[in-house]
Image (cartoon, grey):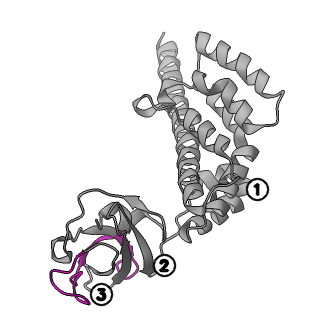
Amino acid sequence: MPSKELLENYPLYKKLQVTNIPDTLNSLPKPAISLFCQKCKDSQTFNMTNDYYDNFNYGSHCKGLIIRAEYICMHCKYEERHFFIKISYDKKWIMKVGQFPAWEIKGNSDIENMLQDFKDYYKKGLVCESQGYGIGAFGYYRRIVEEIIDQLLEEISTLLAGDELIKYTEALEKTKKTTVAQEKIELVKELLPQILRPDNMNPLQILHSALSEGLHARSDEECLEYADQCRKIIIFLVVQVRISKNSAKEFKDSMKKVLEKKNTKN
């Protein structure tokens, strides 16, 4: 059913798997959403102003329909958002098939700073995602992984110590003997520090699986899912590694100052 997740975060033509879609249009929910308002120059709450059945009948069945959702900013009462949403005949998925203004393509400064010469691939991947071109998006994100994997794995080593660092360093040396990103990840994925395993999920394992699928004989829809996984993992790893390194540096600097003051007093 129309949801906050779909309206805020999904590009066009990407299916959102759903359950329990009501039988009739009058029973569909009208979720409030949070989007950036160009007039307010800030993120604001938008509420729906129309009814799904405006162009149909009050009790029309949902299956197979394309419905319209109009939203307005609750702060300025001026900025509008318009969505067209397709409901599948079996009511197992929904997707946006139209949106105005267009789905916002959001970059990430940390990612772009780290990617440097390859940040254009990231931007092009986002553009492909926004248009539902899964094969293109996955291709660009896969290229990014291939280009930055060595640097990323080196960065991860700075988050380890003791025996864990020794094991990781040994595996890291082996990665230098291959140029295949999947093989590099295979060698180190089980040695990832706990700080990079949210809820014990291993992002390198997921990334390895996605990359191993490849582009051959895959549809845009399938590749769009793999592209989404790759992009989110790249962002998570880059940002988390940077945050962890900065936190460690701040801690060391603060402890150094404490020790210096203590030594001065002595």
For the residue marked with disc 1, what is the amino acid? Asp
In the image, 85: left or right of 213?
left
Q: Which residues are magenta?
A: 35-61
Which of the numbered marks, if any, corresponds to residue 117?
1
For the residue marked with disc 2, what is the amino acid? Ala
In the image, 223: left or right of 27?
right
Q: Residue furthest bottom?
A: 55
| Image quarter of the N terminus | bottom left
Task: Rate crowding at label 1 as few (under 14), some (14 to 19) or many (20 or more) other CA atoms within 10 Å.
Answer: few
- Tell me if residue 261 comes above or below residue 246 in the rendering: above
Residue drawn 66% across the image and 53% down it: 141
Measured Cα–Cα span from mark 2 to mark 1: 27 Å
Report helix, strand or loop for mark 1.
Answer: helix
Report helix, strand or loop for mark 3.
Answer: loop
Which of the numbered marks, if any, corresponds to residue 239?
none
Residue drawn 24% across the image and 63% down it: 21
Q: Earlier in the sequence, mark 2 or mark 3?
A: 3
Measured Cα–Cα span from mark 1 to mark 3: 40 Å
Asked if marks 2 and 3 touch (Cβ < 8 Å), the reply is: no
Q: Which residue is mark 2?
A: 102
Q: Main secondary structure of the magenta part?
A: loop
Q: Nearer the viewer, residue 90 or 144?
A: 90
Task: Rate crowding at label 3 as few (under 14), some (14 to 19) or many (20 or more) other CA atoms within 10 Å.
Answer: few
Q: Position of residue 16 (x, y in %)?
A: 40, 60
Is residue 36 within the magenta segment? Answer: yes
Q: Earlier in the sequence, mark 2 or mark 1?
A: 2
Report helix, strand or loop for mark 2.
Answer: loop
- Tell me if residue 18 comes above or below residue 188 in the rendering: below
Which of the numbered marks, if any, corresponds to residue 78?
3
Asked if marks 2 and 1 touch (Cβ < 8 Å), the reply is: no
In the image, 137: left or right of 73?
right
